[in-house]
Image (cartoon, helix red, strand yellow):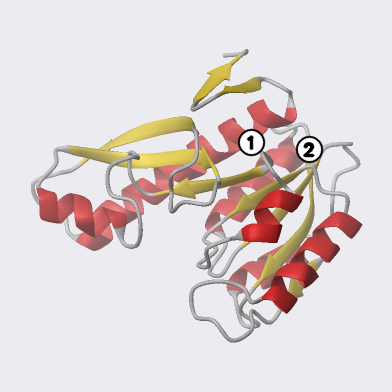
């Protein structure tokens, strides 16, 4: 069930929703002083919708429109309207595979966060864990950041390193990065919900441990 906390989170996702589950469980446990008000997906068959409904959280598919990598104007407006109607304070992207533009960013300016599977600014874009292996780095990880008009370029909220092992494959490395994401994302969302995050230009300052 959704929480009665006054701070409300809207989740956008396109896949299995493991980061959504990590956030929802942290809300239910009281680790995040907030509730998930709504889950939206651009794919009707996305598992994240089923996982939301299992928890009694409203879940909706919104058709993305004619573009492959972003929402068209009608879809964008529909998402904005639904999120506003749900009175969300924060929009958290959890494996949402479309770039947000224009009106959406203005509607929730400074209130959209994303998690990316690398230590940004290294390896933005798709399949960052494969990029890390291809470049031979010894450490990669995950980053929670605010969303702006660029690709994985917004102010960094938090990061967690993950070592790259000699025998790693893309699959094994991706799994370990996922595990780190499930720790980092709830921690960062909790800090935002508590008012413990201040943005000063490109820098994000934590007012709490």
Q: Residue furthest front?
A: 102
Relative to 112, residue 100 above or below: below
Lower sequence index among marks 1 and 2:
2
Q: Which mark is residue 189?
A: 1
Rendered position, 122 above or below 50: above
Quadrant where the C terminus is found in the figure: top right
Alpha carbon distance from label 1 to label 2: 9 Å
Residue 192 or residue 198, whichever sits in front: 198
Do labels 1 and 2 touch, CB within 8 Å? yes
Query: Circle 1 — which element?
Result: helix
At numbered mark 2, what does the secondary structure look like: helix, strand or loop? loop
At a point 60% along the width and 64% down the height, the residue shown is: 13
Looking at this view, name the residue that lies furthest to the bottom.
Answer: 66
Q: Is residue 119 left or right of residue 151?
A: left
Decide if residue 56 is in sight here: no
**For residue 34, which numbered disc appears in the image?**
2
- Residue 155: x and y, percent? 50, 34
Q: Position of residue 53 (x, y in %)?
A: 76, 68
Q: Quadrant of the N terminus?
A: bottom right
Residue 63 located left or right of residue 150: right
* Residue that appears at 55% across and 47% down: 148
């Amino acid at each position: 069930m959704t929480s009665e906390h006054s701070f409300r989170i809207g989740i956008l996702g396109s896949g299995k929703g493991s980061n959504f589950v990590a956030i929802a469980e942290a809300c239910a446990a009281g680790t995040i002083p907030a509730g998930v008000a709504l889950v939206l997906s651009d794919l009707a068959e996305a598992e994240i919708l089923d996982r939301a409904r299992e928890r009694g959280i409203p879940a909706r598919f919104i058709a993305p429109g004619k573009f492959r990598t972003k929402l068209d104007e009608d879809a964008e407006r529909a998402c904005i309207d639904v999120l506003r109607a749900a009175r969300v304070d924060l929009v958290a992207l959890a494996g949402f595979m479309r770039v947000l533009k224009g009106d959406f960013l203005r509607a929730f300016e400074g209130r959209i966060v994303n998690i990316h599977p690398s230590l940004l600014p290294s390896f933005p874009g798709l399949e960052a864990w494969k990029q890390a292996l291809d470049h031979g780095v010894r450490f990669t990880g995950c980053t929670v950041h605010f969303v702006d008009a660029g690709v994985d370029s917004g102010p960094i909220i938090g990061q967690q390193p993950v070592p790259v092992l000699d025998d790693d494959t893309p699959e094994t490395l991706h799994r370990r990065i996922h595990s780190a994401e499930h720790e980092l994302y709830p921690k960062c969302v909790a800090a935002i919900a508590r008012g413990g995050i201040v943005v000063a230009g490109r820098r994000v300052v934590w007012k709490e441990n």
